């Protein structure tokens, strides 16, 4: 292993000077390693991240990239060894539903038995693809985590076991994310729980789990008509955590908010489905449902049962695809068994078919196209063998007929040819042709020989260009030498070799196209679709050429790096602008907060992301930039007001607008009829309120709890008592406004 630390340090010192050692030491701290423990993979991580950003601050982007690329060449790893593969498989073994992991497990089973350079190269490519896929998954997880954190802040005041469960799940996800592990199951459970809590919160009849409802029966609500329940202090503990939704009195506004939450969550679920099942989206049982779900969500309507039906259709399509591949493998194995070829010729394909079956058993989806092509080549070989045998017999009969017409001088040669065993025909015929040509010349039949030589010359000229292109130049030169000597070459045999070389070239081209197809699939959404279409067109050609495909992929790689640089520039500018707006709070700021957390993490991971990851960052950045522009407009409006009223400090203005002159301004929502402090004059009888406060204080003491806001329901009205600014807030409001009021109060 190269001395990675020393190589990187020597490469960076001309550009960073003493700063090079400081940067590398910082990188070692992040990795938790000593200089001697730095591996080439670690070095690549540092070069593409921390070092690259440091170089960009001092050099032009292209120069910084060149320094990184040259340094990467200096620390390049040796060919991947089996122990490295074992470590990689252990790292990704958690992701049991990833087809790439299944293929890697199958490859490892084979490589443990016998090393194979081709399989080793495939395993290394798989590890690189898995690294990229994991980075994309962690990027999605970072986004989910940011949104879940924001959701938790909104519902935390509800308290109860469900909120505590959400907090516990978030802690698990945070820890997994810090360790670079994709916690898909925990994220899905947390998202479902967060959605449930948000819906409860947005419902007009949500009741805090730690606060049993206190009901005052009135004349307008007779006992026999009431559906409310009296609770004792002892019963309250049993219902802790139960969030009760009364769907009857939901306002139109509340229904729309809940629907928006459902649509947002279903869009995320659909994104996950598309990422996991990209290979199934074109199947006839899936594509119509997918179009329907996308149309519903685009219109802002929850897909509900249609999304569930899509999930079921994808699961069924996955089972069908697996069954189809297994059935096709059985067909290929049976067709191979029936081929009239030596076992040695069939052994490589038999081994590849077993590996494909093992991949399928592990949960992967083997690509059968190269195997089908290899079988087709073997079938062609068997056909050519049968045709060659028939051709040799036909040539024997033709030559025997000619010899029988030439007279007694040709009789011994004819007899020798007639008695020649079938298995020796291919070997002996060239010599018999040569002796036949010599006899013709000796018997003065030079014209007949000349005609045959000219015919052979024309046939050879037609074969020569392609034969030489396929590596048969020596065979062509040998045929030309024989013709120059007046001898007849075995052109049918050369034609047979040419056909075999063509089949082998096609097989190699298809194998290369299969490798390029795997790369092109990673560029989905980034121009890879056009390359995949070109690959399919190339496969249908008699002589596929991977060269234009390789060039197209190289162009996509350049485009990817340009996009990476563009996003880095935009991210840097965005974060700088956002920093200038720190301290300016609004609802827009609240919406921006989870996106900001995601983009800060994305900037660190940017050098490691593939095409799909960069597109995800770009999509989020577009949204965040829009919110930032909105936030800037809000600040400009605030500054305009500031200038108009003659104040010089924006913070003073915000203080005046928030809790200064009217500390309750933001609580004066639609539906709030009375608002004030119990300690101040109120248009309400204070004695019952003070008595209620005393009763609640005694309840707090008996339960050993600290009370938050208290809501008392009176039919369609609600009374709220809450501690605020060292006083007791009192509010009378319409029941549909309760959830929004409590949310604003908690904010």
Image (spheres, helix red, strand yellow):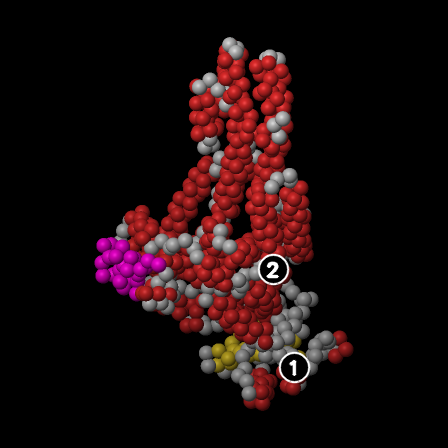
Q: Give the Cα distance between marks 2 and 1.
A: 30 Å
Q: Is residue 397 left or right of residue 730?
A: right
Frontmost residue, 8 versus 480: 480
**In front here: 103 or 182?**
103
Crowd rating for badge 1 (residues with CA inside 10 Å; few <14, some 14–19, many 20+):
few
Q: Position of residue 15 (x, y in %)?
A: 24, 54
What element does badge 2 sit on?
helix
Magenta-tinted stretch: 1-26
Q: Position of residue 345 (x, y in %)?
A: 57, 42
Looking at this rendering, what residue extends furthest in the right direction? 224
In the image: residue 218, left or right of residue 570? right
Q: Please give the residue where the numbered disc 2 appears in the rendered image.
A: 262
Q: Is there any visible trace of residue 645 in the rendered image?
A: no
> What residue sits right under mark 1 in the picture?
238
Within the image, what quadrant is residue 709 found in?
Answer: bottom right
Q: How many marks?
A: 2
Q: Residue at point 64% right, 86% down?
A: 233
Image position of 161 with respect to 328: above or below: below
**Quarter of the image holding residue 27?**
bottom left
């Amino acid at each position: 292993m190269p001395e990675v630390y020393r190589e990187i340090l020597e490469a960076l010192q001309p550009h960073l000077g003493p700063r090079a050692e400081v940067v590398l030491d910082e990188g070692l701290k992040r990795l938790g390693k000593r200089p001697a423990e730095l591996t080439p993979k670690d070095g690549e991580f540092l070069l593409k991240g921390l070092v690259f950003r440091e170089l960009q601050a001092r050099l032009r982007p292209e120069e910084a990239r060149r320094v990184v690329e040259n340094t990467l060449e200096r620390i390049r790893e040796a060919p991947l060894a089996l122990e490295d593969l074992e470590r990689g498989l252990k790292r990704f073994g958690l992701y049991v539903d990833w087809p790439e992991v299944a293929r890697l497990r199958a490859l490892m089973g084979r490589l443990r038995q016998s090393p194979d350079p081709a399989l080793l190269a495939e395993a290394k490519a798989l590890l690189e693809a898995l690294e990229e896929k994991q980075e994309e998954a962690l990027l999605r997880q970072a986004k989910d985590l940011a949104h879940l954190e924001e959701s938790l802040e909104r519902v935390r005041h509800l308290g109860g076991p469900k909120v505590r469960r959400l907090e516990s799940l978030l802690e698990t996800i945070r820890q997994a994310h810090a360790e670079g592990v994709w916690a898909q199951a925990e994220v899905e459970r947390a998202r479902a729980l967060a959605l449930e809590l948000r819906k409860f919160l947005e419902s007009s009849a949500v009741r805090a789990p730690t606060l049993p409802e206190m009901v005052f029966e009135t004349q307008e609500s007779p006992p026999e008509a009431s559906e409310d329940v009296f609770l004792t202090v002892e019963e309250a503990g049993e219902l802790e955590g139960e969030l009760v939704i009364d769907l009857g009195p939901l306002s139109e506004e509340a229904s729309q908010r809940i629907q928006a939450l459902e649509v947002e969550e279903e869009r995320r679920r659909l994104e996950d489905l598309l990422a996991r099942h990209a290979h199934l989206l074109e199947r006839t049982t899936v594509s119509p449902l997918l179009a329907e779900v996308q149309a519903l969500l685009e219109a802002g309507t929850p897909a509900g049962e249609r999304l569930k039906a899509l999930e079921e259709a994808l699961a069924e399509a996955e089972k069908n695809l697996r069954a189809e591949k297994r059935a096709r493998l059985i067909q290929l194995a049976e067709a191979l068994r029936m081929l009239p070829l030596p076992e040695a010729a069939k052994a490589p394909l038999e081994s590849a078919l077993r590996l494909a079956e093992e991949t399928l058993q592990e949960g992967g989806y083997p690509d059968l196209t190269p195997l089908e092509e290899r079988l087709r080549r073997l079938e062609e070989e068997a056909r050519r063998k049968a045709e060659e045998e028939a051709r040799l017999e036909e040539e024997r009969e033709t030559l025997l007929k000619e010899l029988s017409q030439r007279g007694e001088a040709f009789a011994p040669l004819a007899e020798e040819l007639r008695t020649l065993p079938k298995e020796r025909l291919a070997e002996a015929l060239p010599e018999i042709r040569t002796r036949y040509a010599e006899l013709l010349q000796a018997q003065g039949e030079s014209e007949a020989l000349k005609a045959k030589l000219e015919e052979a010359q024309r046939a050879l000229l037609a074969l020569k260009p392609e034969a030489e292109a396929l590596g048969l130049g020596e065979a062509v030169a040998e045929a030309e030498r024989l013709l120059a000597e007046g001898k007849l070459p075995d052109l049918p045999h050369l034609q047979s070799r040419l056909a075999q070389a063509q089949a082998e070239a096609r097989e190699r081209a298809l194998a290369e196209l299969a490798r390029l197809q795997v790369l092109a699939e990673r560029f989905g959404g980034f121009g890879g679709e056009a390359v995949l279409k070109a690959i399919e067109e190339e496969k249908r050609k008699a002589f596929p050429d991977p060269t234009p495909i390789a060039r197209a992929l190289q162009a996509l790689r350049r485009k990817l790096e340009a996009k990476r640089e563009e996003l880095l520039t935009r991210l840097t500018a965005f974060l700088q602008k956002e920093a200038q707006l720190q301290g300016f709070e609004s609802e827009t700021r609240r919406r921006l907060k989870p996106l900001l957390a995601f983009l800060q993490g994305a900037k660190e991971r940017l050098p490691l992301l593939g095409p799909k990851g960069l597109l995800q960052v770009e999509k989020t950045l577009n949204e965040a930039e829009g919110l930032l522009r909105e936030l800037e407009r809000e600040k400009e409006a605030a500054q305009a007001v500031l200038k108009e009223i003659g104040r010089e400090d924006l913070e003073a203005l915000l203080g005046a607008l928030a809790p200064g002159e009217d500390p309750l301004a933001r609580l004066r929502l639609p539906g709030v009829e009375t608002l004030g402090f119990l300690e101040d004059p109120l248009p309400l009888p204070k004695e019952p309120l003070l008595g209620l406060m005393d009763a609640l204080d005694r309840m707090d003491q008996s339960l050993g709890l600290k009370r938050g806001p208290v809501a008392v329901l009176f039919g369609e009205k609600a009374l709220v008592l809450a501690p605020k600014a060292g006083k007791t807030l009192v509010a009378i409001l319409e029941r549909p406004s309760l959830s929004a009021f409590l949310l604003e109060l908690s904010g």
